[in-house]
Image (spheres, helix red, strand yellow):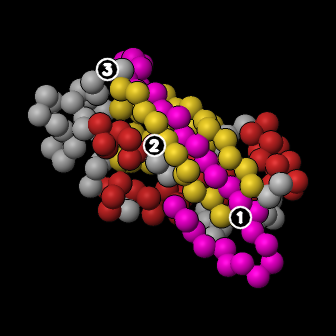
Amino acid sequence: MVVSENTLKWALCLYPPLLFQRIWVQKFHPGFRGVDVKIAKSLFNTNYNGSIFGGTIYAATDPFYALLFDQILQRKGFKVRVWLKSASIQYLKPGRGHLYFTIKVTDEMIADAEEVLNTTGKFIRAYPMEIRNKQGELCATVMNEVYVRNLFDGEKNRVAY
């Protein structure tokens, strides 16, 4: 389903798994070429040592590459199924305050996906993410492996994230 950047932003901000963990989409970049996300520290996501629960940080990174690729490729006329195939995280420093990350999808990433989808029909790539605190210190790194499949005629286009 193709939606506007603002509609998806508010849908995700009010989506209970993100809302209750205080994961806030600050904005989607024009054309879904990126997203800015804030993980707000709160009573709902603080662990016993006073830092943001690692599961919250991990959950915050889950949907965004899939969402971005899905919206971009649909706007280019592709009928696709997109989901996060795998992910790994490395915690480097406790998140004792709000955390932030930005994802950007480049022209090269899109061209790569289009080429593979047009030839083999299945695109799988891993992309890095960096989670930082307000001071800019690196608190966690994440690798998200996105899976995109070009659907055949007759297959239903279902959201898989």
Q: Position of residue 112 (x, y in %)?
A: 80, 42
Say which mark, if any, is on residue 93. 3
Which labelled disc corresponds to residue 61?
2
Taking 74 as reference, is 91 left or right?
left
The residue positioned 68% from the left and 47% from the top of the image is 124
In the image, residue 74 sits, relative to residue 109, either above or below, namely below
Rendering coords of residue 96 (x, y %): 24, 26
Identify the residue shown where x is 60% and y is 73%: 158
- Helix, strand or loop at label 2? It is helix
Direction bottom: furthest residue: 154
User: Which span is picked out in magenta?
Assistant: 132-161
Q: Left or right of 45: which side holds 26?
A: right
Residue underneath mark 1 = 80
* For the residues bearing labels 3 and 1, Cβ distance under 8 angstroms: no
Seen in the picture, residue 157 relative to 149 is either above or below; the reply is below
Q: Residue at x 71, y 64 (%)?
A: 80
Task: Identify the amino acid type marked 2.
Answer: Thr
Residue closer to the observer: 87 or 4: 87
Pointer 3 or 1: first along the chain? 1
Quadrant of image for the N terminus: bottom right
Report if residue 110 lies within the magenta region. Answer: no
145 in the magenta segment: yes
Q: Secondary structure at mark 3?
A: loop
Query: Of 21 and 143, which appears nearest the observer?
Result: 143
Q: Position of residue 79 (x, y in %)?
A: 75, 68
Q: In the picture, residue 56 is in which quadrant?
A: top left
What type is the residue that disc 3 sits on?
Lys
Q: Is residue 57 visible?
A: yes
User: What SS does tag 1 mark?
Assistant: strand
